[in-house]
Structures are given as structure tokens and as C-alpha cells.
Amino acid sequence: MRPEGTRQASFAPRSADASAARPRAAPASFLGGAIGRLLPPSVPFRYFGAAALFHLLAWLALLANAGDVARFRGGLGWPLAALHLVTLGVLVMTALGASVQLFPVATRQPLQSAREPVLAWWLYAPGVALTGLGIGTRFVPLLVAGAVLVGLGLVIYAIVLARNLAGARGMPVVVAYGWTAWASLVVALAAALSLVGAYAGVPTIARDSALALHVPFAAYGFLGMLALGLAHVVVPMFALSQATDERAAFAAFALALAALALAGIAAFTLRTPLRIAAASTAIVAVTLHWRAMQAAIRTGMRRDLGRGFRLVRVGWAMLVVNLLIALALAANVPFDALPTLFGFALIVGWLLTYVLGMLHRIVPFLASMHAARGKHRPPTPSSLAAGRAPGFHVVAHLAAMALLVVAIVADSPWLVRAAALVGAAGASAFLLFVARVIARMLGAQRNGHERGVTA
């Protein structure tokens, strides 16, 4: 008997033997039986809603101390708070919500319970808010309290993810990315707790080494590996194409894993040559991954993936830009703005842009599937996402990115403020978009239930 509160969360074919005989699944295999196998909508949508709210708060935090942004080199204050509201509040929040739904798709292994992801959210979301406020106000006890809650939420999530991956029965390349993301999360958590402990006077790892571990394993390891791995699920699913070629996918994974390992070793020794090797290897891995994604889109039955997917394409391009900047940093290229540009390209250019683009597709797609229960003519994702808010957000986000790049190069607080205002306007539109989709989903479910009762 399946545990109460869960549903079989798999879009894959039911026959494992059939899957083995056909290594590249047909387009319909991503969707077969999905409506009856979803988690309750309150599980992923609480994460997506919180991510949309923290997205707005991050731009406002950036506006609060724009003068220190262009040459930011670390330290407590609102620039660092904005950074963590993006990383923890938007990126990790989205990763948690998406992965608890999508990894069961890839592993053909349902979650044992929906209660654990909900408990993780109740710890993690307040923890992010306290962490951001503690960093912004430089109040260390608040920061420590938030970090503890964030850590507890992530530990619960890590247990849920590990248990699901351990029972995997499908999509081995996605599972490989998942285990790498899981291990990276453990390393990133240990390094982060050491950094927080340093502010409280009890460090466990030398600060330079802890920082050199935290950045690559949090950004490239946990978030990056999840993004690359789950793309093998969502891109063919949205494009209605065959699954990506397994050999090419594993080649890209092996190179990405090697790059991450090189970056980890560089935290302790031979930093310059190992970082150059890591960035170079990662560029090759990303190139192979991009080619696999383009093949899936090109061969799909749905070519137009919507306005939001433009952000995904920009995110892929910015990942390459970020790795080229990483090469320049490792080679000690003399340019004052380079470290800030690296952080911008990594967090805003690649991860944030990519995640927001995916949410443009995932939120209405999941909402449509939930609204479709028991309906002969369910609402389409495009009808649930109708309105001007999504398009405005895409334009505003790209404009804010452009302004922020110029502001960093010119060291201009006024341009940082302009970028933050435009970004906040776009984030407000994105929050409205997510709220409307959820409201329309609930309305469709309510109307369907009332018709069923009347009948």
C-alpha cells in the first residue's frame, strides 16, 4: 500500500522491460499517466510561490545599498543579503520544489510521503528570511538562527532525495546528476556552516578554503548539476521529443563531474592550474550538454516553447560566459570589475535567468495537469498563463541584467539602482504571474468539483 498523502509520481512507462528494449523513449513516455501520479499541488507550488516572493525581495535588498554593489568583495550587508535571497530564496527554493516532483519522474520511484517536503519548507522558508535579514542588518544571532533552520530544512530534503535516488529504476544519467548534486549539497552545507561559525567566532574550516568549497559546490555542484540533470527530463517533455541520447549525456556528465572535482581540489592546493583545468573541462561539458538540448528541441513536435524559454537560452549562453570569466580570473587578468562580473554571470546571468525561464514553463504546465483531473476539456498551460505579466517580466529581467553589467563595469551606484528598480518591476510581474496561475488552477479545480457534485 502506498503511504497516505502521496501519489505515484512518474511520467515514465510502466514497463521497465519495454524501457530497456527502447533506450530512447518516445515523446508520450514523459507524460503517460502523469495526472494520476502527481504530488499534491500544495507541495511544489508552496516552493514556487516562495521563490517568486524572494525574487522580489532580492531586488529590493540590492536597491537598499546600491553603492556597495559594483565592487562588492564580500562581508555582511544588504548586497550579500540580496545574493543569498537569490541563491537560497529563489534558486535553492525552486530546486527543492522542482526536484521533489521531477526526480520521481526520472527514477520511477514515488516519494514515500508528501509530509517531509512540506516540513522541509516550513523550516527552510523562514530560515531564508531570517538569514537574509541577519546578513542585511549585520545581526549575527539572527543570521545563525536562520542558518540553522536552513540547514535543518536542507537535511530533510537531502534525506528525501537520497531515499528516492536509492530506489531509482530509470533514466540513469539523471540519477547520476542527482547523486552528484546530493553529494555537493553535503559539501556546500559543511562549508556554509563553517563560514557562519566564523562570524560567530567558531570556524571549523579555514575561511579561504571554506569559501573556495562553498561557491563551486553550491552553485556548480548542487544547483548546476540539478539544472543540467533535470533538463534531460523537462526539455524533452516540453518539446514533446525523444529522450536525449544516453551516451552523449553521460559524456557531458563525466566531464562536468571531473570539472567539479578539479575545483574542489583547487580549494586546498594548486589553485591556478586546477581552476584553469576545471573551467576548460566545464566548457566542453556545457557544449555537449547544449548540443543534446538543441537536438531535443529540434526534433520535438512542439518547436515554439514560449517567451519564457528565451530566458533559458540566455541562461545557457551566460553559463559559457561565466566559465570564460572564470578562466580569466584563474589566469589573473588585470581588470577590477572581473570578480563582480564573475558573480553576476554565475548567479544572475546563468542560474537565476535559467531558473526563471524554466518556471515560466513548469508552473503553468503543472497547474494544467492538476486542473485537468476529471475534466474532458482541461485548461491548457497557455490559458492558465495568459496575460501581459509573463512577457513584461522577460523584458524587464533582460533589461535589468544589461543595466547591471554596465553598472558593474562603470562602477555606477545610480545604474545599480536603475537595474534594481527595473528588476523589482519585473519580479513583481513574475509574482503576479505565479499567483494568477495558482488562482486559475484552484478555480478550475473548484468548478470541476462543483460540476461533479451537481451531476
Image: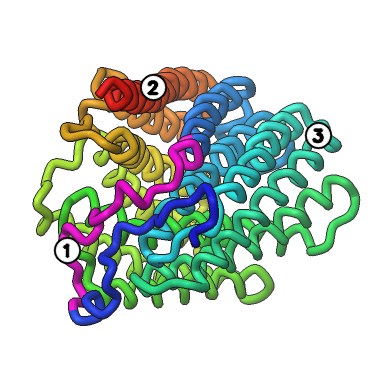
SS label for mark 3: helix
In-front residue for pair 216/301: 301
Upstream in the sequence, badge 2 or badge 3? 3
| 23 to 238, vertically: above or below | below
Q: Nearer the viewer, residue 435 or 314?
A: 435
SS at mark 2 in the image = helix
Residue 293 appears left or right of 417: left
Name the residue carrying label 3. Answer: 142
Q: What residue is drawn where x is 42% and y is 18%?
A: 425
Badge 1 amino acid: Gln
In percent of width and height, residue 14 lies at 28, 67
Proximity of marks 2 and 3: CB atoms separated by less than 8 Å:
no
Q: Distance between the residues labelled 2 and 3?
A: 34 Å
- Identify the residue at image location x=35%, y=69%: 285
Q: Is residue 284 left or right of residue 85?
A: left
Task: Name the foreground residue: 141 vs 213.
Answer: 141
Q: Is 412 left, or right, of 353 in this rendering?
A: right
Residue at label 1? Answer: 242
Q: Quadrant of residue 413?
A: top right
Q: Which residue is drawn at 50% across and 64% down?
A: 331
**Quarter placement of the C terminus:** top left
